[in-house]
Image: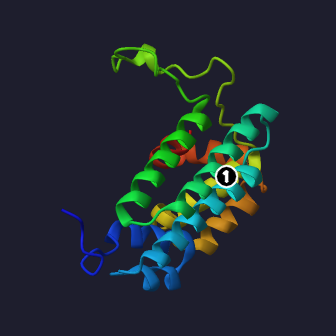
């Protein structure tokens, strides 16, 4: 039985995600949204954001990987533009995201000729052509510590200015010294960072 477009609305989880990614206006536009064109607009916006994030975030990648990621997004954009129903656009977007995630991990498995693929961990090693690696330089670590302190642990330092004083004066603006300080004085915070 087809869904009546007048009763279909955007799920709150999607509205909250758009709020997180694009701000209050996006949330307001999508909350209880019944407009297919508006939904399509946001799916296309997500595709564009994925593309920006890939090219602005990934610093080291082989050309083949970047081409594969670009093709997934370009083909996905074409497929979304052809969608006519909420159900269709939801399924297409799930497919795009799934392909993108697997490709970001290393490669999209192609087992279409296999009769059955068991969901065992050895069947999901995707690093034949490339390997994902997360690295963190000193500035990344510093910003991560700052965010963690601001979001969850500021009460351990009094207020933000007390923490800033500690970092710049006692630790000499050196993230390694700050890490040593946290390891010795706040092992709970240190455990979340290391």
Q: Nearer the viewer, residue 192 or 41?
A: 41
Could you tell me residue 172's position as x and y percent? 78, 55
Residue shown at the point (79%, 37%) measured from the top left: 60
Residue shown at the point (81%, 35%) measured from the top left: 63
The crowd level at tag 1 (other Cα within 10 Å; few <14, some 14-19, many 20+) is some
Along the horizontal axis of the image, is 57 left or right of 147? right
Along the horizontal axis of the image, is 192 left or right of 104? left
Could you tell me residue 193's position as x and y percent? 55, 44
Q: Is residue 148 in view from this perspective?
A: yes
Q: Nearer the viewer, residue 189 or 68?
A: 68
Q: Is residue 186 in view from this perspective?
A: no
- Could you tell me which quadrant the N terminus lies in? bottom left
Looking at the rendered structure, the secondary structure element under dot 1 is: helix
Figure check: 61 above or below 186: above
Residue shown at the point (40%, 52%) measured from the top left: 91
Count of numbered badges drawn on the protein: 1
Figure check: 80 above or below 38: above
Could you tell me residue 85's position as x and y percent? 39, 66
Figure check: 57 above or below 17: above
Could you tell me residue 99's position as x and y percent? 53, 40
Residue closest to the far left: 1
Q: How is the image coloured?
A: rainbow
Q: Nearer the viewer, residue 149 or 32?
A: 32
Residue shown at the point (62%, 54%) measured from the top left: 144
Figure quadrant of residue 132: top right
Along the horizontal axis of the image, is 79 left or right of 113? right
Figure check: 168 above or below 175: below
- Could you tell me which quadrant the C terminus lies in? top right
Residue picked out by circle 1: 74
């Amino acid at each position: 039985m087809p869904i009546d477009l007048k009763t279909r609305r955007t799920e709150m989880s999607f509205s909250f995600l758009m709020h997180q990614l694009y701000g209050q206006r996006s949330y307001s536009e999508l909350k209880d949204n019944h407009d297919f064109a508006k939904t399509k607009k946001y799916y296309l916006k997500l595709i564009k954001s994925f593309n920006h994030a890939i090219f602005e975030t990934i610093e080291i990648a082989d050309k083949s990987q970047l081409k594969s990621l670009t093709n997934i997004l370009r083909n996905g954009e074409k497929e979304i533009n052809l969608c006519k129903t909420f159900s269709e656009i939801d399924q297409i977007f799930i497919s795009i995201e799934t392909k993108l995630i697997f490709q970001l991990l290393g490669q999209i498995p192609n087992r279409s000729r296999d009769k059955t693929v068991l969901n065992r961990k050895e069947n999901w090693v995707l690093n034949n052509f490339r390997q994902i690696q997360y690295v963190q330089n000193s500035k990344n670590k510093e910003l991560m510590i700052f965010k963690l302190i601001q979001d969850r642990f500021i009460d351990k330092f009094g207020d933000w200015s007390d923490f800033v004083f500690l970092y710049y004066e006692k630790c000499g603006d050196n993230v390694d010294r700050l890490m040593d300080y946290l390891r010795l004085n706040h092992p709970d915070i240190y455990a979340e960072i290391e």
